[in-house]
Image (tube, helix red, strand yellow):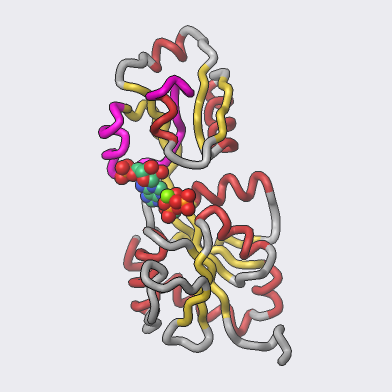
Amino acid sequence: MNKITEPVITLALSKGRIFDDTVPLLAEVGIQVTESPDTSRKLILPTSDPHLRLLVVRASDVPTYVQYGAADIGIAGKDVLYEHVKEHPGGLYQPIDLDIAKCHLAVAVRKDFDYEAAVKQGARLRVATKYVNVAREHFANKGVYVDIIKLYGSMELAPLVGLADAILDVVSTGSTLRANDLVEVEYVKAVSSRLIVNQASLKTRTQYLQPFIDAFAKASQGNK
Ligand code: PRT
Ligand code: MG
């Protein structure tokens, strides 16, 4: 079988909120996802459309699968994309903001930490984050000196145990910050998820890919 002309499109996405918000988008264009990554152990899920299959991967791995062409398209948060593109530029189009999995990136500190005063005094701040590049850029633009501590999760813990003065993390409802006696002190960037497309796939498989890109564009109109 000639792989290049095989008209099956592979969409990479993460389970959890992105998967949950993508299922209704697909339903809007008549595609049902027949299995859930929560109950199935399969990492490749079929859909009701024989031309579309889903690849379930870690959120931060989605751009990698698409960049290398292991998936033709993917869905990833802008938070993940900012970091990925800084470190591995090229090979990806980001044609559509799907307006799903919305949240924002923010700086937060312990309630009893006077962030404004620390910044004013020109203190060197220790910032724990998974978003090293966003953080570097954000604090450089403010002229604040920071030592960045890279973490892979549970950032909210870092200020509580003295690992960091501040965190830069994703905030949605704010309840995780509140539950840990942290307060948001700076709004950094709005985040939602984008459809991403492998550039080479788009060139060589346009006729198969374009209908899916158009379908996502149409379905996401409802979220705008
Ligand atoms: O979990 P894993 O390490 O595999 O990766 P991940 O955490 O990146 O994946 P996932 O599925 O949790 O998030 C995927 C994408 O969803 C992210 O890249 C964001 O673009 C988007 N998103 C939207 C969020 C949230 N909302 C969100 N609330 N990602 C994470 N959170 C976390 C946040 O890190 C914090 O710990 O939820 C907590 C805060 O939520 P609130 O509602 O208490 O403010
Ligand atoms: Mg998570």
180 horizontally vs 10: left or right: left
| Residue at point 31%, 27% (across, down) | 183
Residue 110 seen in render: yes
Q: Position of residue 188 (x, y in %)?
A: 44, 35
Of the pair 24 and 212, the residue shown nearer to us: 24
Quadrant of the rendering where the N terminus is positioned? bottom right
Q: Position of residue 124 (x, y in %)?
A: 54, 14
Quadrant of the rendering where the C terminus is positioned? bottom left
| Residue at point 61%, 49% (across, down) | 84
Q: Residue furthest top?
A: 121
| Residue at point 62%, 65% (across, down) | 66
207 horizontally vs 157: left or right: right
Q: Residue furthest bottom?
A: 1
Q: Is residue 165 above or below residue 180?
A: above
| Residue at point 56%, 60% (across, down) | 62
Task: Kindly indicate the quadrant of the structure image that contains residue 177.
Answer: top left
Q: Position of residue 69 (x, y in %)?
A: 67, 69
Q: Is residue 18 magenta?
A: no
Q: Is residue 35 above or below residue 158?
A: below
Task: Kindly indicate the quadrant of the structure image that contains residue 4.
Answer: bottom right
Marks counted in the figure total: 0
Q: Residue furthest front?
A: 41
Q: Position of residue 160 (x, y in %)?
A: 38, 24
Q: Is residue 178 magenta?
A: yes
Q: Is residue 57 above or below residue 206?
A: above
Task: Kindly indicate the quadrant of the structure image that contains residue 186.
Answer: top left
Q: Is residue 129 above or below residue 74?
A: above
State which region is magenta.
Answer: 160-181
Residue 192 seen in render: no
